[in-house]
Image (tube, rainbow, N blue to C red):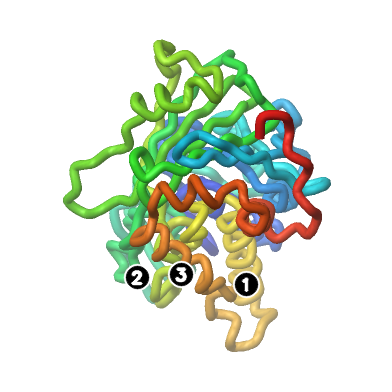
Amino acid sequence: MQDCRYDVIVVGAGFAGLACARELAMHGLRVCVIDRKQDLGERMHTTGILVQEACDAPLLAGLPPALVRAVPHVRLYAPNLRSVRLGAEGYRFYTTDTPALLRWMGQRAEACGVELKRGLAFRGATRTATGWRLDGMGEARVLVGADGARSRVAEKLGLGRVDQYLHGVEYEFDGVALREPDALHCFISKRFAPGYLGWVAQTPTGVQAGLARRYRSGGTHVPDMAGFLQHVAPMTGLSVTRRPDSIRAGLIPCGGPVRPMQRDDVVLIGDAAGMVSPLTAGGIHAGLRHGAMAGRSLARSLSGRAGPDVASPPPVPGFAFKRALRWAFDHAQFDVPVNLLLAARPMRRVVEQLCFHRRGDPPPAPAAGD
């Protein structure tokens, strides 16, 4: 154990965990990240779609171009499959080769001095006079839980736990091209995606198609991917008989930040902290930002360069407006109004602002057939 004493142990080598660990290592602290997977690209629970702001995160500096594909537009479909094409000048989404991206992020963190231990599952921690002991893994002054929506760190150590979810499923089709590859295709449908939506996008390696719906504890409904793909095939060009090359699924937090998020030298970040937009379910940008902020805050505290209030967690958004929209989406989602209003200019403007983070440029003129 003498060789396994760290300033911080981070549980979970996802976007938030690696962003936090990098900041700690860059401040000269000894940090270890443990992850239950031997390969960081296996058994993922993320779409890997990046908003443009996420690409500015320090952890993603120097991101290899082969791992991302720029997607400048969103095509939004009403339940009757009529659509509008949206965009903002200079703004892009980025789809990714997500398994390769996570492996690259792990290598980048290691290059910054992070000790990354793969194939180790967190099962509990024991309080010591100076921090925490994780049996067989080491001791640390601070423990960071970045282990996903069903965080075992939160469960075992009595922190706030995520209690509202979306259930998402995503198929990957290698080597396939969409009919309109420069758009993120988003489908509103109470039948297939109550409480959320479906999506199809071109990636660096092919096409990903996903579907998410509100998750109810004890419920038996799962996303109907086969029905969804058959429904949207005329719009996307995807073959309904093509079998996916890989499938990933999981629960997505949608209830906002948990409470408490930190106590007794334990901090939750990323999905474990509920740092996911309740409306869009986007968690990568929030995870990268919150993880980095937590890392900087902990670094200042552990190095003694900060005042007594630095032990408090970094500020987090309340998501009040998006939580209100989440309630409306859960309780007042009807197909007929969406069919009627989607093409209306005020509605297009609102949707564009939500999609493109309030970019102020007017949407481009509709293409033929919009």
Please tell me whether residue 88 is drawn above or below residue 296 in the rendered image: above
Q: Secondary structure at mark 3?
A: helix
> Which residue in the structure is indicated by mark 1?
297
Q: CA distance from mark 3 to mark 1?
A: 30 Å
Tell me whether circle 3 and circle 2 mark residues in contact (CB < 8 Å). no
Tell me residue 126's x, y (percent).
31, 65
Ranked by sequence position, the earlier of labels 2 and 1 is 2
Q: Is residue 127 left or right of residue 21?
A: left
User: How many numbered marks, from 0 up?
Assistant: 3
Task: Name the residue rendered at 49%, 39% in the picture.
Answer: 187
- Residue 324, numbered circle: 3
Please tell me whether residue 345 is drawn above or below residue 96 in the rendered image: below
Say which of marks 3 and 1 sits in front.
Answer: 3
Q: Amino acid at mark 2?
A: Leu
Q: CA distance from mark 2 to mark 1?
A: 19 Å
Q: Quadrant of the N terminus?
A: bottom left
Tell me residue 194's x, y (percent).
35, 48
Q: Amino acid at mark 1?
A: Ser
Q: Amino acid at mark 3?
A: Ala
Please tell me whether residue 293 is drawn above or below residue 370 in the rendered image: below
Tell me residue 163's x, y (percent).
31, 62
- Residue 193, numbered circle: none
- Most extreme residue toward the top is 241
Say which of marks 2 and 1 sits in front.
Answer: 2
Task: Name the residue rendered at 60%, 81% in the picture.
Answer: 310
Task: Name the residue rendered at 43%, 32% in the picture.
Answer: 170
Tell me residue 128's x, y (percent).
36, 71
Tell me the crowding category of disc 3: few under 14, some 14 to 19, or many 20 or more residues within 10 angstroms, Cα based: few
Residue 153 sits in quarter: bottom left
> Which residue in the structure is indicated by mark 2?
159
Q: Secondary structure at mark 2?
A: loop
Task: Name the residue rendered at 38%, 43% in the picture.
Answer: 193
